[in-house]
Image: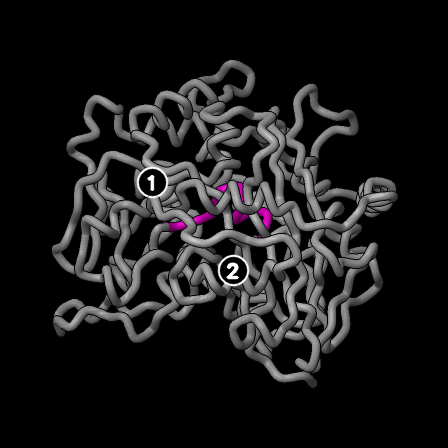
Amino acid sequence: MRINSKLLSLIVTMITVIGSSLPAQALKLNFTYDRGITTEEKQAAELAANIWEEYLTDNATINIHLKKSDASKLPSGVLSGSVPAFMNNVSYSNFYTALKSDRTIDNNILNNTNDELAVANLPMSLLWSGITAKMEGLTSKSFNTLNLTRANAKALNLLDTNSSDLDGVIVFSDLMNTGFSWQNDYLSSSVGTNKFDLTSVLIHEIGHILGFVSGIDAVNDGNYSNTTDRSKYISAFDLFRKSSSTIDGQINMAYGGTGTSTPYFSMNGGYTAIANLSTGENEGLTSSFFFWNNYQPDGEQGSHWKRSTNGVAVGIMDPSLPTNTRRSLTNIDLQALDVIGYNRASSTFNSLSLSKLSTLKSQAQTTVNGVVNSTPVTNINKMFKQNRWGGASSTTTLNQGQDLTDYLAQEGLFQVNNGTMWERYDEKPQ
């Protein structure tokens, strides 16, 4: 999450939910906490989890481990990052069948909800051979498998919804010697000029674990010209990554994109652009052909909305967060998860009251009472030994007593485009 030094005004957009009673089914976000995480930081994480749970009703438990890392051990300028666990090589046919089965109908009116619209505009599985991913210029690649985060697979009942296996890891910097610090209380009157709101960041990171990811972030110098390798990383959310030049059924997997190649989120096959998407972190990775110069990446990971330039973020998955700013979920964030298989508590989006947020905060404080900090070495090793994004798996083992940050660095996850959705800052303390 890059920090824009020009955006210093406080943005307080309250979270929303409809109805006062709990849904019959509800998503459960289950956090474990590494050594060194304070009670206040745990409370911020539990509040972030409670906010997501207010919106999603899938009968599944998502297991996330939270780690606070020494800023000096992380890549320069890193604020936080997430490493989702993936279910690889899911056939499009299985995904389509599961999504079709999972869709909901409001008031029994066909095509009245986001997932109905999404399913209606996805190609039927029998016609999958005609679907391709458009890359740079005239390059395209047919494919028939997808990557789903484990959380996304659980929402679609493609995995055991009550599995205790780890579904992702979130790392955040301790900000030591950076001139910045964290604001842990989401309901405080202000955040502070040199402070970042931890709850906002954790809501964002949970979004990646749930499935807001793009195969754009697997493109690197080594596979840029290898369409077969690049197609292995296409995610469920990428099915809705379109542009005005791809409304013929293709998805837009170009690295970079301006003009007619500008990627955007669309639920109806590309005919309606809901929000633009970021186009790639590596600004030096561009096509060498002069007539493809509209494929210039914008410097932000593709697993985000297009970066805000006026201080008004599209949603929590915006890659830019200034200091002295709070962010929250928006309807567009929820639409993105709705179309990949999550069920919303309501199709209407209204503001959550301060009293409701206070109640969720109290629940968070109660949840962390007696929670013991520990590193679940067995679960972490199992997660990294299983196939990760694109089918890769760990070649090393986390040892008892080893720092998790050191292990992640050893795994190469701090390298550009290697499976971690980093959130960065680049402003200077005021």
Compared across the picture, whether 156 is left or right of 287 comes to right
Highlighted range, magenta: 205-214
Label 2: which secondary element: helix
Magenta-drawn stretch contains 326? no
The circle on residue 89 is none
Residue that lies at the very extreme toward the front in this rendered image: 400
Amino acid type, residue under disc 2 in the picture: Leu
Tag 2 residue: 408
Which SS does the magenta portion mostly show? helix
* CA gap, disc 1 and disc 2: 29 Å
The residue sitting at 57% across, 40% down in the picture is: 166
> Which image quadrant: the N terminus?
bottom right
The residue sitting at 58% across, 41% down in the picture is: 379
Amino acid type, residue under disc 1 in the picture: Leu
Front-most of residues 142 and 120: 142
Tag 1 residue: 239
The residue sitting at 21% across, 29% down in the picture is: 128
The answer to whether residue 230 is visible is yes
